[in-house]
Amino acid sequence: MSGKLRWLWALVPLAGLHAETGADAWLRYAALDAAAARRYVNTLPPVVVVLGNSPVEQTAQRELIRGIRGMLGVTLRVSSTVPAEGAIVLGLDPAVRKAVPGTPAGNPLAEDGYALSLRTAGTARHLSIAGGSERGVLYGTFALLRKIALGEAMEALNEHSAPYAPVRWVNHWDNLDGTIERGYGGRSIFWDKGVVREDLSRVSEYGRLLASLGINGCSINNVNTDPRILTAEYLPQIARIAEAFRPWGVRLVLSVDFGSPQRVGGLATFDPLDAGVAAWWKAKTDELYRAVPDLAGLLLKADSEGRIGPSAYGRTHADAANVIARALKPHGGLFFYRGFVYDHHMDWRNLKNDRARAAYDNFNRLDGQFDDNVVIQIKHGPIDFQVREPASPLFGALEHTNQAIELQVTQEYFGQARQLVFLVPMWKEALDFDMQARGAGTPVKALVAGKVFQRPTGGFVGVSNVGLDANWLGNHMSQANLYGYGRLAWNPDLTSQQIAAEWTRLTFGNDPQVVQTIESLQLKSWRVFEDYTGPLGLQTLTDIVGNHYGVSVEASERNGWGQWHRSDEKGAGMDRTVATGTGYAGQYRPAVAKRYESLATCPDELLLFFHHVPYTHMLHSGKTVIQTLYDLHYDGAVSVEGYVNSWKLLKGRVDERRYAEVLAQLEYHAGQAQVWRDAVNNWFHRASGIADAKGRVGHQPGRIEAEAMTLEGYAETPVTPWEGGSGGKAVACQAAECSAATRFEGKAGWYTVRVQYFDQNNGNARYRVKVGEQVVDEWTASNWVPTQKIDSSSSTRRSVTGIALRPGDVIRVEGTPDGGEKAALDYLEVLPERP
Ligand code: GCV
């Protein structure tokens, strides 16, 4: 190294911050600082003994060695016997107790539960990791490693932990061709071009992440199921995935198509009450278990969004579920039947129709008719993972049926991993919501775990949809949702703050400023997102018939999908009351129903979910509905702008790669929040005709519409829907190169020039910004957003900071189209910078 380079090297701050891809997520096992590492090395026995031979226990031992090596820089010595001076002893509960002298007798551990304890006798020191099952041993090992990573004291270690519910699964909506429905982290880790991937190393790495959270089941194919999955050709392939998961204690689950007996079985019918159909399911299930002996179960979406189901023969969901459940029963398998059943061809003109009613209407009357190995998998709200929904009333209704809550980890309606939204606080609200199913004290979490009505099974399902991208979910921050889902599935009593803090420290390290900043961003992010995408119970005001990403306030209306919010010139909201509306409120137990039924007691954040009111309706907050909508959209956009500033303060404290990637994501996010702010506010402003009391809506300081600039080659084009473009219009380039120019007439000074342009996914247009003849910025619009159109989904902001402007300067944006992308522009904003 030359002398000069050596100097540069010495100046690199925090040299440990090498670039990270995010692939290790929260299992980085980053080296602790020397003093902390020494403390642990002095406390922990240097030897490890694993008492069992099972693959899962062997995995536990390997993981322990790996974690200790990474964090403490030492390698545990493997021994087959417990030496007198002590060891870390891993094994099943009674075996560990026998092997470690002086371990006190205690209650047997719950299945999958674990106990950690450190005992000292004379000079001997034993740390035991005892599991109620092989999986428990592995979970205990991960728990110990987490404690070390978080810097927890070991000296008085004595901890028992049991999972809150037996079912802690993830689902994947992966198609056999390798695409993922609603997946934002790349292609499938399981499938490629119609077959199971040759290289399943990523599946094994994923198994490790899941095991670290206590997840014990994983479905590997879309609930919109390709029936071929049950053909003989696929069974050996599926078995390979099961094999990759097995060392991590993750059991395989398959989604099935209800028409399979006919579609792949060659029967004339798939009627669940037909004896031949029952025999087919039995034979098929036996065949599956021969290929995958530890298959956890099967999953079905029926009679929903075009999927066939028992209605084809006038049979019930119980008939459908039981025929498959009975085939699974001898193998100990569970059958998950999705509660997401609704008619998407409803007549919107009928004010009594209501999609929110569907799950309860379909399943409540069948309570008690499902076999004991059937679980009804219920989305957390009655619609479909919207930004704000009440907890589904079905949780409080089923007394004789197993249930599980379905939470969506993948951010379908939450910015599709391009925006930062930590979903744990939202899930907590659903899980903690008291359904009053037996008087007070019956929160959703207890109902789904079968603790209220003493059901044999139940629990949690998270739609994860990770992909092959290095960071699994499309951005680093979204990993917190997978982590948070898993932690809640193990222990829903953890607080959002605990989970955010744990995840941040494991993922980004223990620097207090980093922890404080990221934790605070994550914790506020759901409410901020709600503020600018669908407050007061409107649900997410996105394009619900298209990509579920950009703004489209009316997309939900005048169609059969039933995500109506019924906003018009006079008011907004769905009347779901019993008195005058759809009666949905009456699906809750009386105490809850009463609260939602009345305008006086319905919480503001759900007002428009339950009531249709005029825009001038006064909220409990003392503000009108319309002014609240305006204000929240401004507050939301300001908050996201603040994310960027907070993140910038972490430069040098987070490794360069993740720092830069998150910064780019947050800058993009801030631009999108502004697009949403303007689109939603302009829509409600036009609909209501009521001015913003603060004079902001419709008046954007420093904004110059592209169509008002001097255009060469550019032509005006409408934006559809209109609210997605400023003034409802944009300009698109019709030549090989175009330009849009404006003359600056403000005061001389430092300015930020913001270019609002459209970055579709059908080309890589180029942009250049000039002041006079000087190029001050240029870039390629190569972001991947889910649209080929000039609309709010493709609307993107580029901020060019620190530009010295003088009156008379010409600011010119030059655009070069590429493919279908016409280098379109919406507006410029020229904003003075604070001195
Ligand atoms: C897998 C929503 C999603 C669909 C999904 C469906 C479901 O409608 O947009 O992609 O289909 O929910 O949960 O079955």
Image (spheres, grey):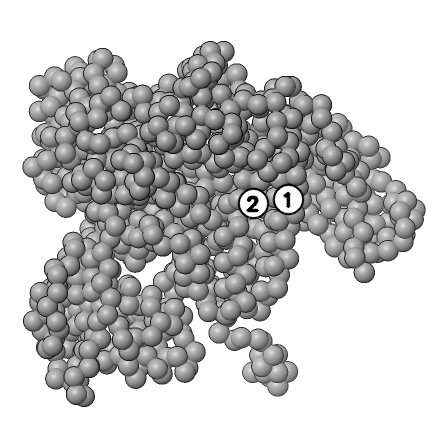
Residue found at x 26% / y 79%: 44
Report the front residue among 575 and 750: 575
Residue found at x 28% / y 81%: 43
Neighbour class for label 2 at 10 Å: few (<14), some, many (≥20)? many
* Up-down relation of residue 451 to residue 229 (above or below): below
Q: Residue furthest right?
A: 808
The mark found on residue 635 in the picture is 1
Q: The residue tagged with tag 2: helix, strand or loop?
A: helix
Badge 2 is on which residue? 528
What count of labels does the image hold? 2
Q: Tell me if label 2 and label 1 are in contact, CB under 8 Å.
A: yes
> Which quarter of the picture shows residue 562?
top left
Q: Residue 104's spot in the image, x, y percent? A: 12, 71
The mark found on residue 493 in the picture is none
Quadrant for the N terminus, please: bottom right
User: Does any portion of residue 305 appear in the rendered image?
Assistant: no
Report the front residue among 785 and 390: 390
Ligand 1 under 8 Å from disc 2 Cβ: no
Q: Type of residue at label 2?
A: Val
Report the front residue among 42 and 324: 42
Counting residues from the start of the chain, the first of labels 2 and 1 encountered is 2
Q: CA distance from mark 2 to mark 1?
A: 8 Å
